[in-house]
Amino acid sequence: LSPSGSSRGWLLAAGASFSLVAAFSGTATAVAKERPEVPLGRDAEVVLYQYEACPFCNKVKAFLDYYDLPYRVVEVNPVGKKELKWSEYKKVPVLMVNGEPLVDSSAIISELHRRLNPSKATNIPPAAPAPAAAAPAAPGAYASSIGSTTNSSSSSSTSGSSGSGGSSSGGMAASVGHVGERGVAEGQAEGELDEETRWRRWVDGHLVHLLSPNIYRSPSEALEAFDYIATNGNFTAWERTMARYFGAGAMYVIGKKLKKKHGIADERKDLYKAADEWVAALGERKFLGGDTPNLADLAVFGVLRPIRHLTAGRDMVANSTIGPWYERMEEAVGASARITEADGATSAGAAGDGAAGK
């Protein structure tokens, strides 16, 4: 979705529409995680180009955190996107693995999962390399492991068309407006998909549509969201001011347009209904994956994590049955695996950390 008009304030509002982060406090004791069949090696150089709380970027971060794959973050300025000037592909997330750029959140996750677990096939095609004039030199001196040479399939997402897991300059507004299903078993009938894949498709094709109308539901909620944008996004001083005072109003209007576009009658009730629908699918299981999360669990958790401590997220937990599952996911995912540039150490889930691991 691109905002109309020539005002740069509107452009900024769209570009920054969901570059916010929720602060996670407290420390959870990590439970035993599913380990890869083939030793991963923790020496792969992984760099995530992102908007801080873009739901698609958070899907990728949830996977990286759960599998304890250390990664660095490059925060992309949603207005100029100069951090992606090396690439023809201008959406986030872009994940660099030993210098190899991968795009589309669902396909990125499937490709990483395939490399970790070669014997476990998924119904989602591998992430395709992003077209680039020249890939930037990855920071650090990590060797290859997960980034071993593979045959990646080409996809429409590399041409800049909208896929199931990328945010363009419109941040979350654009993401919600352009969600497709290319990354999730395109061409297969719903009945032919396994449970995990069906729910991954549900995340990209339904759940994410509910987020923007909810966080921008009222002027006060839009301001709450943009206060985080101004504080945590990669902006100049002028852009930060515009994000805080103009962006909130712009996105309040855009949120209403998205609500109408996607046929959402009551954004809160639909969010609660979606949360309850997800929990009902679990049955008696701790996670959709059973005793441990699967890729669908990580996808739902990833897109909800940035809104959890906003008003919309608090209301969702208070008015649906999702709270216990979400707490189990926080514990299972554990501390963030993000590497801070200050000391080269992982962030260990500190409150306010970019990966928001807790």
Image (cartoon, rainbow, N blue to C red):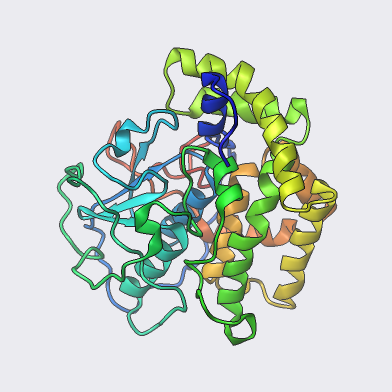
Q: Nearer the viewer, residue 156 or 296?
A: 156
Task: Answer with left or right where residue 69 lies relative to residue 290.
Answer: left
Q: Nearer the viewer, residue 276 or 326?
A: 276
> x%, y% of residue 200?
57, 68
Q: Residue at x 63, y 51 (%)?
A: 304
In percent of width and height, residue 183 lies at: 47, 66
Q: Foreground: 153 or 329?
A: 153
Q: Quadrant location of residue 301?
A: bottom right
Of the pair 45 and 220, the residue shown nearer to us: 220
In the rendering, at what x and y percent does residue 214 appear? 73, 42
Q: How many marks?
A: 0
Q: 52 left or right of 17?
A: left
Asked if 247 appears above or below 74 in the picture, the reply is above
Q: Position of residue 316 (x, y in %)?
A: 77, 49
Q: Can see residue 176? A: yes
Q: Quadrant of the N terminus?
A: top right
Instruction: Please report the residue visible at 56 percent of the width from the left and 52 percent of the height from the top.
Output: 178
| Residue that appears at 26% across and 65% down | 146
Residue 28 in view of the camera: no
